[in-house]
Amino acid sequence: MDTKDVEIYLVFNALRNVPAPEQAELFLRKLQQCCTVFDFMDTLSDLKMKEYKRSTLNELVDYVTVSRGYLTEQAYPEVVKMVSYNIFRTLPPSDSNEFDPEEDEPTLEASWPHLQLVYEFFIRFLESQEFQPSIAKKYIDQKFVLQLLELFDSEDPRERDYLKTVLHRIYGKFLGLRAFIRKQINNIFLRFVYETEHFNGVAELLEILGSIINGFALPLKAEHKQFLVKVLIPLHTVRSLSLFHAQLAYCIVQFLEKDPALTEPVIRGLLKFWPKTCSQKEVMFLGELEEILDVIEPTQFVKIQEPLFKQISRCVSSPHFQVAERALYYWNNEYIMSLIEENSSVILPIMFASLYRISKEHWNPAIVALVYNVLKAFMEMNSTLFDELTATYKSDRQREKKKEKEREELWKKLEDLELKRGLRNDGIIPT
Amino acid sequence: FHPAAGPSEPKMAGADGDDSLYPIAVLIDELRNEDVQLRLNSIKKLSTIALALGVERTRTELLPFLTDTIYDEDEVLLALAEQLGNFTMLVGGPEYVHCLLPPLESLATVEETVVRDKAVESLRKISQEHSPVDLEVHFEPLVKRLASGDWFTSRTSACGLFSVCYPRVSSTVKAEIRQHFRTLCSDDTPMVRRAAASKLGEFAKVLELDYVKSDIIPLFTALASDEQDSVRLLAVEACVSIATLLPQEDLETLVMPTLRQAAEDKSWRVRYMVADKFSELQKAVGPEITKNDLVPAFQNLLKDCEAEVRAAAANKVKEFCENLPEDGRETIIMTHILPCVKELVSDTNQHVKSALASVIMGLSTILGKDNTIEHLLPLFLAQLKDECPEVRLNIISNLDCVNEVIGIRQLSQSLLPAIVELAEDAKWRVRLAIIEYMPLLAGQLGVEFFDEKLNSLCMAWLVDHVYAIREAATCNLMKLVEKFGAEWAQNTIVPKVLGMANDPNYLHRMTTLFCINALSEACGQEITTKHMLPVVLKMSNDQVANVRFNVAKCLQKIGPVLDNNALQTEVKPVLEKLAADQDMDVKYFAQEAISVLALA
């Protein structure tokens, strides 16, 4: 700001020192004043004005909290304008070249002393008893929401926390914006998964969605199911999953509690995206799967037990002991144990070979001990089948080896054929 | 495709597909294997399977199976999408190429971007193998279906297919294609608008000029003012292609308003894109507009409030100046660009300074000797003293440009302290970088200056505590010998290298061996046999096994430089002794050397 502006920037009386009838007008004047945005990167400039704005914002926060009858119709556009001027901005590039939220310290917003009060004021405004969504919807519209959602990419966790509350309030009070908000969150997630793998506010958005899903009416709309299968499940593929996995798993479980029939597509989706090279993620997947199994209905369990336990059997024999251990902990879960017991004739043959082999081969003694317990449990559940599998273990392995050999021979024949053809029709066969 | 073999090929492959040997069920079992890795392997060898089946059964049995099983893991689908792009001959040639469309169409709708992109790539490839009739009957309807798909993925894929069929279809179909493209440019989801914006330039190139003006320009303007900056910045890329297509007189009205707006966009990402594409834009709009519009725009980008944008613009300083119209180039640079450049030298952001340092030396060729000495030299010197090592490195790595114009001597006073400081930087990557420029510097500064000032540095690197530095230092010596010759090597570096053979630290003793590996060829037979070989042979008695097996490796390496007499009388006995060493690795490498040098 140059000096001319400073002169315009009149120092007004405090609101509480003015007679009630004049307060509404003064409130508007103060809102307009607060539209001026200061440069906080320059720590030395406009110090007095910055301090004046800060105290004015503080006063506005108190005013909307305690006053009655302040919210005239003229105030709405002024409030939204002041908030927009202050919070909507193109977020700066990250300080570190490749910002890694797991490693790097986030860059904190320099203008936070003002920004925080603006958010605080806006939330009090939205929560005020006098607030009327029917008037506000003229100003808090789709464009406003879109800009608000873009701010969730802020590196500053304090800002994202305020945004979360703001968006939650808007979603709660503006029924006409709900579908739009959900669609835009979809777009943010899809871009995050398939284009950039970068967005700082995924956890916060998921947290809001968790409570939104909770409120969905039954039967679920096709739109919501599509969101689950086409957006939430693919979110598991992102590299930085650990930053929002808890919130994501919560959303998934919310969906399944609403509609158990979704269990099969969800589990098949998780199996499709099962991490193959990242053990840390594998442990997270196993954790989420256990949360799902905790609420699964036995009829649903039967539908997915085969592919599910094929994967669990692979996890149990993982050379990474944390993966193996996490999978073996399923056998400590009473509900899961009861499901396994009911279906032991299907599950035991799937698991047996892996368990048998690990009990002899795994490098980690703790895993071997756990496997012994699991084998013992199976033996108690279904001793006839267990004995049968033990007896045929060797011949089964031999059969597998034979099949493997046949495969190799088939391919060898096929390749010979290709070679022969290649020689004959040189240049025709694409390589 | 070999035209002579074409007609007979389908029949032959059909005749050879032996049903009893390769029942489709067996092959399909392979493609269905429970183990993903095996499934993936089978898909990667899909052409072999198709060959075994023959063209007809590939068309009637294999392709329908593949079309139905598009629910696999993305990795398998990616391999499939790639395979199908090369399948034309395996289904019977161009006549039947449209059989490949159904599976590729499904693949073009999956969620995973890499799979979809690969499917689109294959579709683009096989579109060229369609006859014009097939293109209209089979291919274009597919594009239309994708363009009006429910889920954004298919619409995104469609964006990449318009340009390949447009040139080869009738004018009615062309009109439809243009309509579809228009619709996608204003799609509801930003993902599709981004895809459309990124293909805008490509599509413009195949359109008739009138339609570029009537269709593309409004789309370009709309995308360039999209509410999402991720869409707007893609329009900047399209701007280059579009500007190239239009006649000069239309640029001012059709393109420039949008470009000006982009250069001042409120989002730094868009401004960054403008800066990043600046040279292309400059060439596309031509010299007049450059002088009037781009020069001020470039100045603004160099002064942008966001460091990211300044760095991108700084990177383009040399290219921009180089491409200025020759008349008035010097004046424009001196009055408009150089003042901004001077400010950037003391920018607060090190990436900006470092970007500038990587190109600033290039200005000297453009401005000539006098201007360089008067105006640029002070800037070079300031950057050579910059606190950030990357800035100094970038200056040093581009010394050749200045050398041509004013000779390096002008700089050598300041150069030396800068080099020494980098050579001793605490970060080994910085040390590594400066080593890589040593041969270049040595060439430019001359052997005398080198011996006096830099030789000791090069030798010091040989005993650096980081292996990568010792390794690079070894390689550096080889390049220096190539430059200065064997005699120089014998007098200056060989004695020092050989001296390290008696170092108490075995790592340094090994460095001697590594140096000999690198130097023997450049030094030639005489020096190798007379001076190096005795040292190597003596080291075969070292008490550290690592040194001994490196002796074996070294002998293998320098063997070809030695004459047969030395090999037989000196090398062979030592290798035989090492081959009987108690250490397994020493034995192994000694035996390897014996067999490679044919001394057995």
Image (tube, coloured by chain):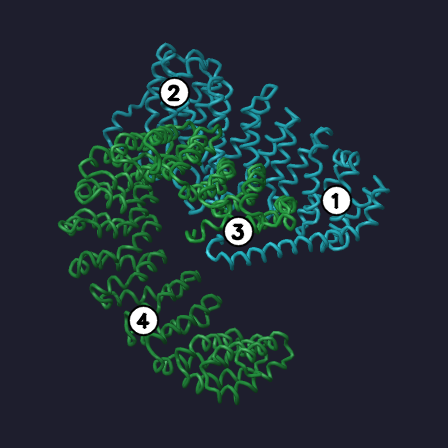
Under mark 1, the amino acid is: Met
Would you say the residues marked 4 and 1 are in contact, meaning their CB atoms lie under 8 Å apart?
no
Q: Judge the density around disc 4: few (<14), some (14-19), many (≥20) Cα neighbours within 10 Å.
A: many
Instruction: Residue under label 3, please give it.
Output: B12
Q: Quadrant of residue B185?
A: top left
Amino acid of disc 4: Ala
Dot 3 amino acid type: Met
Disc number placed over residue A351 in the picture, else none: 1
Q: Is residue B18 left or right of residue A336?
A: left
User: In the rendered structure, are the residues bearing label 3 and label 1 in contact, judged by CB atoms less than 8 Å apart?
Assistant: no
Chain shown green: that is B
Marks 4/2: CA–CA distance? 68 Å
Q: Is residue B190 above or below residue A359?
A: above
Pair 1/2: label in front: 1
Along the line of sight, the residue nearer the viewer: A153 or B196: B196
Q: Residue at x 61, y 19 (%)?
A: A218
Q: Chain of mark 3?
A: B
Task: Judge the density around disc 2: few (<14), some (14-19), many (≥20) Cα neighbours within 10 Å.
Answer: many
Question: Do the residues at pointers 4 and 1 share their chain?
Answer: no
Q: Residue visible at 41% across and 20% down? A: A140
Q: Residue drawn at (34%, 29%), measured in percent from left and top?
A: B172
- Crowd around label 3: few <14 · some 14–19 · many ≥20 (10 Å): some
Chain for numbered disc 4: B
Q: Sequence-wise, which precedes: disc 4 or disc 3?
A: 3
Chain A is shown in which shade? cyan
The nearer-to-camera label among 4 and 1 is 1
Q: Earlier in the sequence, mark 1 or mark 2?
A: 2
In the picture of the structure, the residue carrying the numbered disc 2 is: A79
Closer to the observer: label 4 or label 2?
Answer: 4
Residue A88 quadrant: top left
